[in-house]
Image: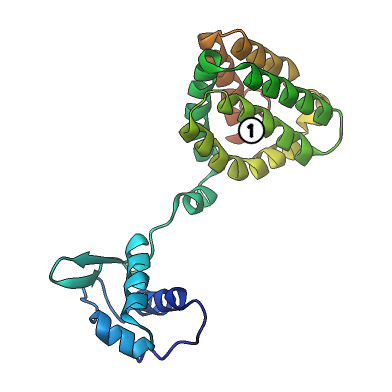
Amino acid sequence: MPLGALRPSPLVEQAAQRLREQITGGHWPVGTRLPGETTLAKELGVGRSTVREALRALAGAGLVQPRQGAGVFVTATRPAEDWPTRLRAAAVTDVYEVRMLVEVEAARLAALRRTDEDVAAMREALDGRRSAAGGGDDAGFVDADIALHAAIVASARNPVLTDLFAEFAPVLRQGLIDLLDLLDLRGRDPRHGEEAHAALVAAVESGEAEEAARLARTELESTLALLKGPGAAPGTPA
C-alpha cells in the first residue's frame, strides 16, 4: 500500500500519523525493519529531518525502536497509553485507593511543612466548602471539596504529590458527584463531613502529623467504602 504524498501543514504530525497507520494497520508487523529515512522521505514527499522527527514521536509512543547501526524496528502495533489516558480508563475505586496513598502521606507532610500562606489557603478552601454545602449544587460542592484537599496536598510542599493529585481530581470528580446523587448524602445532611474536614485542617495547622494522617485516612476510607457499593459503612465524600 503506497504511503502517498502529504499536504503542506504540520508535516511532522502528518508523517507520524501516516507511519502510525501503516504500523497499526498491520502493514509493518512487530519485528519489521522500517524502510530507511531516505526511502520514507521520498514516499511521503518530505525531507529526511521531518521523517526523523516523526520516527522520534513514534518511538516515544512505544511503536518503534531505533537500533544502532541496524535501523528502526517496529516494537508494538498499539501506542502505549499515557498516564492521563490510563487514569480515565481505570475504575474509580482503583484510582481512589491510590489517592488515599497520596493524600494520607500528604496530610502528614503538610502538618510538618505548612507555611502561614498554606494555612490561609486551607482556611479559605474550608470556608468555600462550607459555603458550597449550603447550596443545592452537588457539582459545586464536590469542586469545593476537591479544592480543600488540593490545598492540603499543596501544603506538603512536594510538587510530585501536587501533580499526582491534579491528575486524580478530574477522574474522581464525576464519581463523587454520582455518589452524592445516588445516596442522597447531602439531602440527609447538607453539611455532611464539615466537622471532620475542619478537624483535618486544624491538625495540619497545629503540626499534628500523625493525627492529620489518621483523619485523612478515616475520611478517605469511608468514601471508598461507599464507592465500592451498598452495605458499606456510612461516610462522606472527602
Q: Position of residue 229 (x, y in %)?
A: 61, 35
Quarter-of-image position of residue 201: top right
The answer to whether one can see residue 227 in this image is: yes
User: In the drawing, does residue 193 fall left or right of residue 118?
Assistant: right
Q: Position of residue 165 (x, y in %)?
A: 54, 36
* Residue at which label 1 appears: 230
Crowding at label 1, few (<14), some or many (≥20) Cα neighbours within 10 Å? Answer: few
Quadrant in the picture for the N terminus:
bottom left
Q: Tell me what residue is drawn at x 49 percent, y 39 percent.
A: 94
Name of the residue lying farthest toward the right? 135
> Is residue 163 positioned above or below 206 on the image?
below
- The residue under the point 56% across, 9% down is 207
Q: Amino acid at mark 1?
A: Pro
Q: Quadrant of residue 72?
A: bottom left
Q: In the shown orientation, is residue 72 left or right of residue 53?
A: left
Residue sitting at x 49%, y 87%: 7
Residue 103 lies, in percent from the top left, at: 53, 26
Which residue is drawn at the image coordinates 78% and 38% (left, top)?
Answer: 140
Q: Is 220 above or below relative to 46?
A: above
On screen, residue 8 versus residue 187, left or right, reads left
